[in-house]
Image (cartoon, rainbow, N blue to C red):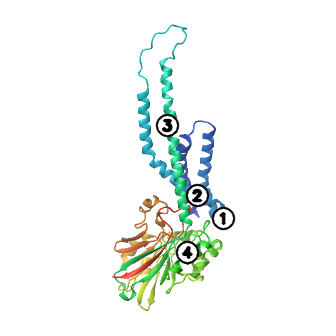
Amino acid sequence: MLAALAFVATMALITGLIHLYLWKRLVRDTTRPGRWRRIGGITMLVLAVLVPVTMLGTRQGLYWLAWPGYLWLAVMFYLLVLLVALEVPMLVAKLVLRRRVAAAEPTTAAPEPALVGAAGTADPPAAAAVGADDHDPGRRLLLARGAAIFAGLTAAGTVGYGVRTALGPPQLDRVQIPLAKLPRSMDGLRIATVSDIHLGPLRGRAHTERIVAAINRLDADLVAVVGDLVDGSVAELGEAAAPLGDIRSRYGKFFVTGNHEYYSGVEEWVQELDRIGLNVLQNERLEIRTPQGVLDLAGVNDPTADGTGLAAPPDYAAALGDRDRSRPVVLLAHQPVAAVEAAKFGVDLQLSGHTHGGQMVPFNYLVRLQQPVVSGLGEVDGTKVYVTNGAGFWGPPVRVGAPPQVTLVELRSV
């Protein structure tokens, strides 16, 4: 609970600073002092408060906050990105405008003599200079309004596209991964992989049913659900998760915990998933015996477990030690960064999620600072790592550049 409050407090500080910047660019720079500037300021303040209130409120069952709060979070993000990107061209435009105004001002000259009280006496040169300067603020206001309109329309259009993508059906992808230790007799073994389903305030049972239907169409040998299934308790979301029991596979369906399970009552969820037929791998390894040969399948807990007291932290030695190294081993681990430790145990392939593929471009570039692989197939210290985009979303119901995904991983012998 304390960790969740600290996270919300941090987000409140960050979003507060972002909204201060947005107020400067969208309200103060685009309006003159008066009624409309006050209305814009109040609106920006309300929107700034909406973000942390949504994060806290949805955890307390106030799900009606989710749509307005999380949609605004996405719009806010893209407004920030676009306005920051416009800073340099806006600065250049202001400098050009300033030079043009300066060049247009009349050269100061001595005033012509005039008779005191004579009719038709011209205005003094100082007044003419003031009139020339008046054009500069007006043009700057027009420039600021143009940038604000461009950023607003582009952000709204991007978020609209992202909502349609996020709420649409998951993309079905196939990837072939060669494993040196895989016997030729097991060539073509298929593992349906999905992560980050994120049942919660905005996605329920229908979401699960659609994902299960997509998985079953793949006719896989194994099914791996690699974490972040839920954002809520079993009491709230047990019914929504129930269709997972209908997943079909030849040799079993397996689950490993993600970080969000530790915010949602992990012990109850482990029991519930076991009840509906998913085999939860908690720092353990199983032999998958097929008529064609044997494959080791291991799973480790998410690092978030460390220090929570709710479950054991990831234990790679327990899951991967003391095994027959002549056999290939596939590790299920929610976060791609687990491969750094997994590689020390000679893991052939790690299946992960967590990153959402970045979820909203250009956020994927920030994810690279924490995770060695963001999306697709990569390699860490000799261990191959496949990261699926996930089938759901966290926070904003928006996906840009990273569509929801269910992947069929086909293992090939070399």
The image shows residue 168 at horizontal and vertical percentages of: 55, 67
Answer whether labels 2 and 3 touch (C-beta < 8 Å): no
C-alpha gap between disc 1 and disc 4: 25 Å
N-terminal of the pair, mark 2 or mark 1, is 1
Name the image quarter holding residue 316.
bottom left
Residue 235 horizontal/vertical position (percent): 65, 73
Q: Of marks 2 and 4, which one's residue comes earlier in the chain?
A: 2
N-terminal-most mark, 2 or 3: 2
Viewer-proximal residue, 164 or 211?
164
* Residue density around tag 3, few if under 14, some if 14–19, many if 20 or more, within 10 Å: some
How far, Cα to Cα, is label 2 from label 1? 18 Å
Res. 395 visible in picture: no
Tell me the quarter of the image containing the C terminus: bottom left
Tell me the residue that label 4 is attached to: 211
- Between discs 4 and 3, the one toward the N terminus: 3
Residue 71 is labelled as: 2
Mark 2 to mark 4: distance in Å? 23 Å
Q: Secondary structure at mark 3?
A: helix
Contact (CB < 8 A) between labels 1 and 3? no
Please report the residue visible at 53 percent of the width from the left and 64 percent of the height from the top: 165
Question: Which residue is pictured at 45% across the width and 89% down the height?
Answer: 289
Instruction: Kindly tell me whether residue 378 is visible in this rendering.
Output: yes
- Numbered label attached to residue 140: 3
238 sits left or right of 313 in the view: right
Residue with the mark numbered 1: 61
